[in-house]
Image (cartoon, rainbow, N blue to C red):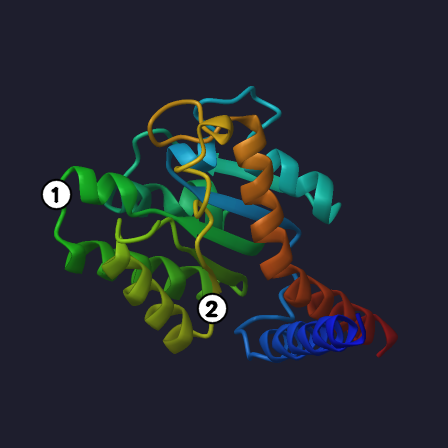
Amino acid sequence: MRKNRILVLFLSSCVVLLLSACAKREIKNVDSRGENIICFGDSITFGYGAESDEDYPSRLGEMTKIPVINAGIDGDTSIEALKRLKSDVLSRSPLLVIIEFGGNDFLRQIPKETTIRNINEMIDKIQAKGAMAAVVDISAGMFLKEYRRKFAEIAQEKKAIFIPGILSGIITNPSLKSDFIHPNGNGYKAIAQRIYSTILPYLNQNTLAKEELARK
């Protein structure tokens, strides 16, 4: 019993240290003065397969208590998304933009290099607007593994947030899916929680930065 308690304490300490390390990672524009979290993506962001109030952006808004805009379009590719970046994202006072693309690029056989280039350009323009950028990884197991690796590299290089494995354990669980690929309401709730857990340290840093600015 005593050994079990020691093991639990050790694992808990490791988790705390890991979360602290993640929270200290430098992110560009963590002092963003934007007002809205904007979820920019395809059907996963749109919420295909669930009721209108069960999509992950709606759930995320409940968790963060910050206005969240759903800028997801079913079937969108990174090529199409780049064309609407200004109107759907940059013009809407972004605090943080959560970028979720790649699945339709893969299905439509858009070269991976094109997808990576488009994600890079999105991040550059979002950061130039003064907002934080986050890149979502929708890979699961071997599916889209190369995208996961490249997205992680981009996030590291650009000082953007990387949100790994939002579909992990969901696309293999029929109780969390509405069809072969898309989550249902419970699946989107799980996605929202994963995203929230990753972005929370940076939202907290942003709040502190704004409070410090208000005191000056």
Name the spot of residue 14 as percent of width and height, x first: 65, 77
Q: Is residue 61 above or below residue 22?
A: above
* Quadrant placement of the N terminus: bottom right
Res 155 → quadrant: bottom left
Say the numbered circle drawn on residue 123. Answer: none
Crowd around label 1: few <14 · some 14–19 · many ≥20 (10 Å)? few
Residue reaching furthest top? 51
Question: Which is more foreground, mark 2 or mark 1?
Answer: 1
Closer to the camera in the image, 122 or 181 = 181
Please name the residue that numbered disc 1 is placed on: 109
* Quadrant placement of the C terminus: bottom right
Q: Is residue 178 above or below residue 131?
A: above
Three-letter amino acid code at the position of disc 2: Ala
Name the spot of residue 2 as percent of width and height, x first: 81, 75
Please name the residue that numbered disc 2 is placed on: 160
Three-letter amino acid code at the position of disc 1: Gln
Closer to the camera in the image, 93 or 166 = 166
What number of labels is visible?
2
Residue at left 66%, top 80%? 17
Name the spot of residue 55 as percent of width and height, x first: 55, 31
Name the spot of residue 76 as percent of width and height, x first: 30, 35
Q: Is residue 142 above or below residue 47?
A: below
